[in-house]
Amino acid sequence: MRKQLLFLFVCFVTLPVIIIYSVATIIFNRKADENLTNIYSNDIKSIASIAENYFSESLDLTMYPLLENNLYKYLITPSDHENFADITTQAATILNSSPYVFGGNRGVVIQKKDGNQIDTHSNYLTSGRITEQQIEEATRLDGKCYWEYTTNKSAPQFFITRLMKQKTNLQVPLGYIRVSISSLELRNKIQNSMLDKNSYYFIMDSTDNMLLSTNSNQNYDTVLCQYNFAALQQLAESRQNTVLDNQCFISAYKIENTPYLIGSIHVSGMLNSTKNTLTNILTVTALLTAFFFALLALIFSNRIVRPIQELSHKMDSISNENFSVRADVRGHDEIAMLATQFNKMSERLEYLYRQVYMQEIELKQSQLLALQSQINPHFLYNTMDTIYWMSKTGDTEGIGHIVSNMSSLLRLTFTPNGNNTGTLAEELEHLNHYVAIQQIRYGDSVNFELHYKEEFQKENVLRFLLQPLVENALVHGLKDCPKETIIVKIYRQDQCLIYRVMNTGTPLDLQLIPALLDSPKTEQKGFALKNIDRRLKLKYGDEYGLKYMIEGTYNIFEIQQPIFW
C-alpha cells in the first residue's frame, strides 16, 4: 500500500501542487501588504489602549480627593481649625494607601488654596509644591486637566494638574491636585506588548515634541521626520490608521482624554523572510495535504478514510473529557499501529486526568480556602474594635499604624495570583504586617521572635502557610494565659526548608489534633491546620505534612518543604 500511495502522490499530487504553489505565492505576496496593514492597525489600537488605561487611572486619581471623605474633609477644613492636624494626618494616610497610587509609579500632591499641602512622598517621582505656572494653567482651564511633560533623563514623567471645586458649589475653588506619572513605566508597558523587538513606538504632543520612544534608530528618525502631529492625526482619523510608505508601515492613534498621539513604525523588509516562510507553510501544507488526501479518499476510502474518521470521532470524545474511549485495532498495517498508539495515548490521558489534573484542581481549591481563612471575620472584628477604642482615646498614631498594616495585609492576601507558590520574602512580609497588628492589639501580652537567615528569602515556598501557624499559636496560646511567647524559626535541613513555630501558654491536646486533621468536616475549628496539612501533602506527597509536639513549656508546630521544587 505504501508503494501505491507513493506512485499516486508523484503522478497526481506533485505536479498540480507545484503549479498551484506558484499561483498561490503570487496571490499571497499581493495580499501580504494588505494583511500586514490590518495587523499593524490592530496593533497600534492595542498599544494605544494600554496607554489610555495607564492615563485613565491617573485621571481617576485627580478626582479621588472629591470622592474620598477624609481627603475632601481636609480640603474644606480651614487650616486654623483646632482638629486640622488630625484631619491632615488621616488624609495623608488615606492618600498614601490609595489603590490608585499602588497601581503604578505615581506621585500625588494635594494643595489647598491657602498653600497647605499633603503628598505621597514618592521616592521615584518628584514631589514638592505645585508651581505657579501649573496653578495658573489649571485655574484657566477651570476644572479641566492641564498636561505637562518633563524630559529629566533620570525620571522623565507626565504631569496632570487640576483645579478642585466644592461639590455643593462649583463656584468655590478648594485647591489643586497634581499627579506625576512615570514615563519609564509606560514605556516598559509598551515594550512588553510590542509586536516585535524591531518595532518603534512613540508618543507625540500637538507641538511636535517627541515625549516617549521605545528605542533609538536613525532609520526610524529619517522616516518620522516626514510626519508632524497634524499629519499623524489625519492618519489616526483615517479608516485604516496605517499606511505603507517607503517600505515602512506608519501607524497612528489618538490617545483618548489626553492631548497626545501614539504612533509606530514597522520596517516591512524585516518581514520578507516571514512572508516567504508563511507562503511555503500555507501553500504546501494546506493545498498539498488537502489535495493529497482528497485523491487518496477516492481510491482507498474503505482502507484509510473510514478508520481515520472513526478515530476522529473517538478523539472528539477525548476532547469532551471522555478518556475511557478506545479504538478498535484491526490488522497489522499503519492504521492499526495508529489505533494502538491512540489507545495508549487515551490510557495515559485517563491516568493523568485522574491522578494529576484532579489533584491540581483540589490544590487550587484548597488555596482559595486558605486565602479566605487568612483574614477571618473574628480577626477583622477584633481589629476594628481595637481601632474604635484607640480612636476614643485619641491615639491617631496608633490608628495610622494599624490601618496601614491592615491595608497592606489585605492587599497581599487578596491580590490576584494564579500561583500556589511565592518567595519566602513575600511570606515574611505578610507575616510582619499581621504581627504588627497583633502587637498593637495585645501590647506586652505577647512577645514575638523571628529567626532566619537572609539568604533564605529568595527560596520558593508554598504560599500562606506561615501566618496561619502563627495565628493558631496566638489564639490558642492566649486562651487561658495572660502572657505568651511565640518564636518562629526558619532553617534549612538537607534539601528542605523548615518552619518551626513555638509558643508558650495553654498546652496542646495531642489526642485532639489527629482527629481534627483527619476530620472530613469543614467547620472553622481546626480549619487552618487541616488546610496546611492537606496542601503540603497535595503539593509534595504524603510524607510531607504538619508535625506537632510539646517540648518543655513550648507547644510546637513544624512543617517542611523541599526547596528544589
Image (spheres, grey):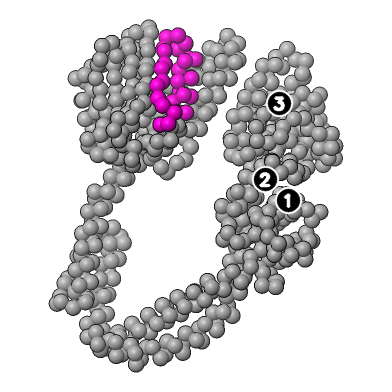
Q: Quadrant of residue 94?
A: top right
Q: Which residue is mark 2?
A: 183
Give the residue pinned by disc 3: 118
Q: Residue furthest bottom?
A: 11
Q: Is residue 161 left or right of residue 28?
A: right
Dot 1: element: strand
Which residue is at the front of the view, 165 or 395?
A: 395
Mark 1, Cα crowd under 10 Å, few <14 / some 14-19 / many 20+, is some
Q: Amino acid at mark 1?
A: Leu
* Rendered location of residue 388, percent (x, y): 54, 15
Q: Is residue 402 above or below residue 120?
A: above
Residues marked 2 and 3 touching at CB (< 8 Å): no
Residue on which disc 1 sits? 211
Look at 60% across and 32% down and name the residue there. 98
Disc 2 packing (10 Å; few <14; some 14–19; many ≥20): many
Magenta stretch? 428-456
As measured in the structure, the alpha-carbon distance from the residue carrying label 1 to the one carrying label 2 is: 9 Å
Residue type of the residue flagged with mark 3: Ile
Q: Give the x, y percent position of residue 170.
A: 79, 34
The label nearer to you, 2 versus 3, is 2
The CA distance from mark 1 to mark 3 is: 28 Å
User: Which quadrant of the structure image shows residue 156?
Assistant: top right
Extreme left residue here?
331
Which mark identifies residue 114?
Answer: none
User: Could you say where residue 22 lies in the image, as x and y percent from the top left?
Assistant: 50, 86
Horizontal and vertical percent position of residue 89: 66, 20
Q: Earlier in the sequence, mark 1 or mark 3?
A: 3
- Say above or below: 395 vs 296: above
Rendered residue at 77%/63% (across/down): 225
Is residue 378 one of those drawn in magenta? no
Q: Say which element carries label 2.
A: helix
